[in-house]
Image (cartoon, rainbow, N blue to C red):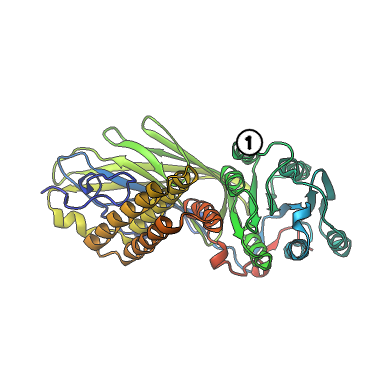
Amino acid sequence: MKTPATHKSPFAITAVALALFVSAFQPFSPSALSAPSSEPIKLRVELDRSVLPADTADRAIVKIAIDGCRLPRTGERPPVNLSIVLDRSGSMGGEKIQQAKAAAIEALNHLDNGDIFSLVTFDSRVETLIPAVRVGSNRSELERRIREINVRGTTALFAGVSQGASEIRRNIEDSRYVHRIILLSDGQANSGPRTPEELGRLGAALVKEGISVTTIGLGLGYDEDLMARLALKSDGNTYFAENARDLAKIFDAELGDVLSIVARKAVVTIEFPEGVRPIRFVGREGSIRGQNAELTLNQIYGGQEKYALVEIETPRARAGAEREIARARIAFEDAVANKPATLTAATRARFSDDETVIVKSANLKVQAEYADNRFAEAKAQAVVFADAGKINEAAKLLSEESLMMEQFAVTYGNKEVLDLAKSNSAEAVRIQSEGIANADRKKYRASYNSVTMQQGNAIDGASSTGTNAPKSKDSK
């Protein structure tokens, strides 16, 4: 019996018959966890169906999941090397600069003695207000310098980030440290390199050094394409703060991530046997060469899951056969023990000509994750259409995606996918009548990074985790 062909796939931006992709998902099982309890992360490989259709080449999704184990609240954590890069240009006047300074002081208060802190300000010129220094009895002096910041000039954003990176590099050779830049800006880069491509290249270069950049866009005047690209390419988080009063919550959530890193400099390789054809990564960026796929993650946080989805063409096999579909290996640095480590995991599938057996193996969680990534991709493309004045095309794209997803959700009884479909259908109607407003455009850009990079602390759900984070090894 063939896989159902009565619905269109909700996961392709163009209409593709559901027969090409039937998302029945393999349930999670404890045996899929490959790491012993002493490891800081666990590696899983899941297939979107534990049973694949026999005697045909079908479409399926392989999920590579990395679970960060929680650090004990009273345990040790890796020390942090943090540089805050703060926009002090004229547009940051009033409440914006006051809230930004308060957030920077709060970030400083999250750090332990022995952590490293620096602060760079930028306008038309760049100033290292606080050179990289170990935090200790100097806290009051550091706080005083932050409070004295005032506004002036234009926005040399690229130069500011570059100087922040220079401060990080003063301690880059110390392998114990987690290296992070937090960039806060409310405006357009109007001095020096200023395109998303140029900032993306900077982010890609920094992540090779183990430095991630988190970007916080404040208000409605900043360049979300530039900020999102910088964060995406450097494996950092990105936030849209429509109001300056959101900054304290954002900094608290971001420091919660930075203070809970359990693994870093991770390289994931996925091998597909002959007969399995990897097609593309969905959402998260990665590379595919022949039968191998690869992606990198600069940092993995305790208590969070990071994953990659790879669309594949399945092998032809007779009913009753069983085959390995994918094998993954992750090489990383244990951030707590400060040593290299590797893990491996694999997934297998059975083949059947019974449609009911195939459909009943649905994993609703992975199904919803894939749907969420497809909607993120669709919205990103809708923004491209809208920017070109093609509002009808933008609305049509999201509407068709929603319709296909709704049909799919009904087929598999997936309430989460159905809710996503209804929400995005309403969004398509709004785009058709109103276009994409500036604030919505910024939300779409931030949401794309949040979904595809599995940013667990997006502003709507940010929680105060930093104050309960474990203490640094070097805390005194």
Q: Secondary structure at mark 1?
A: helix
Q: Nearer the viewer, residue 103 or 318?
A: 103
Residue 453 rendering spot, x and y as whole percentages? 50, 51
Up the image or down, 462 lies above or below 443; here it is below
Q: Nearer the viewer, residue 59 or 442?
A: 442
Q: Is residue 97 left or right of residue 39?
A: right
Q: Nearer the viewer, residue 170 or 225?
A: 225
Q: Nearer the viewer, residue 201 or 252?
A: 201
Residue 184 rendering spot, x and y as whole percentages? 70, 54
Q: Is residue 382 left or right of residue 313?
A: right
Res 88 seen here? no
Name the amino acid, label 1. Glu
Farthest residue toward the top? 290
Which quadrant holds residue 186? bottom right
Res 406 seen here? yes
Q: What is the total number of numbered labels drawn onto the structure image?
A: 1
Which quadrant holds residue 328? top left
For disc 1, the marked residue is 198
Q: Quadrant of the C terminus?
A: bottom right
Residue 374 rendering spot, x and y as whole percentages? 38, 50
Q: Is residue 464 left or right of residue 353?
A: right
Residue 322 rendering spot, x and y as whole percentages? 21, 45
Which quadrant holds residue 208? top right
Q: Dot 1 surroundings within 10 Å: few (below 14), some, or many (20 or more)?
A: some
